Image (tube, rainbow, N blue to C red):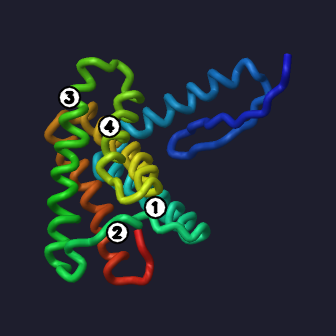
Amino acid sequence: MKQLQCIQMVHFGHNIYFKLSFNKRQFFFQIMEVKKQIKIELFKRSNYQLLFIFLLISMIFSGFCNWIFEVYNIDPKINYKDPLKNKLFLKFIVNVLFAPFIETIIFSLLPFLIFKLKIKSLLLIILALSFIFACVHTYSIYYMVFGFFSGILLNTFFIITYIKHGINKAILFTFLYHSSYNFIAFIINNFSNLHC
């Protein structure tokens, strides 16, 4: 039997420990246990904790993508002409309030309600919703890829909140998540020399 080194997450109280395992046969079961443990941890969290966790992950992901864009001298919004360039207040209303609400309804809620009737796999639904989200952010192929992975986070958050609390809280907290992310990006893009 071929030996394979893998890491297993073991949860004791509020602490998470990692231990090494060397049995190839157990690898699959360990991965499934880690996935199960992550699900349990996510569902135990309050909506505000989930909002913070997902927002933090989004900001780390965005920072990583921006670093890659800088290193390889890529302009992810190369085809984007900002019609609100000098209208800061209007830009704030559109990007932080209006767009997250409309995108939550049109690109998360409505397709989810349609897809959940036909597709049983939540993973496939999340990927489909994320593809739709990416197709709306067509500034460049790089930004579409960024939008796809951002959509995975956004739609995973939407579905977790939907399962835990139903449609109204899913809409509200997904809007808050998306709006908070856009607010941070708005501040960074308009009041610093960094860009999101």
Q: In this view of the protein, which residue sits in the foreground, 144 or 177?
A: 144
Q: Are marks 1 and 2 in contact (CB under 8 Å)?
A: yes
Is residue 148 found left or right of 88 in the rendered image?
right
Tell me the distance, in whole angstroms, between the alpha carbons under discs 4 and 1.
19 Å
Q: Residue under label 4, please give it.
A: 129
Where's residue 191, x and y in %? 33, 83
Q: Residue under label 1, please give it.
A: 62
Query: Amino acid under label 3?
Result: Leu
Where's residue 11, x and y in %? 56, 37
Tell me the distance, in whole angstroms, between the alpha carbons under discs 2 and 3.
29 Å
Q: Secondary structure at mark 4?
A: helix
* Vertical order, 132 against 177 (above or below): above
Quadrant (top left/top right/bottom left/bottom right) for the C terminus: bottom left
Q: Earlier in the sequence, mark 4 or mark 1?
A: 1
Tell me the distance, in whole angstroms, between the alpha carbons under discs 1 and 3.
28 Å
Tell me the distance, in whole angstroms, between the alpha carbons under discs 4 and 2.
22 Å
Query: Amino acid under label 2?
Result: Ala
* Vertical order, 65 against 120 (above or below): below
Residue that protrudes farthest toward the front in the picture: 79
Query: Amino acid under label 1?
Result: Ser
Q: Residue under label 2, please give it.
A: 185
Q: Secondary structure at mark 1?
A: helix
Q: Are marks 4 and 1 in contact (CB under 8 Å)?
A: no
In the image, which is nearer the foreground, mark 4 or mark 2? 4
Q: Dot 4 surroundings within 10 Å: few (below 14), some, or many (20 or more)?
A: many
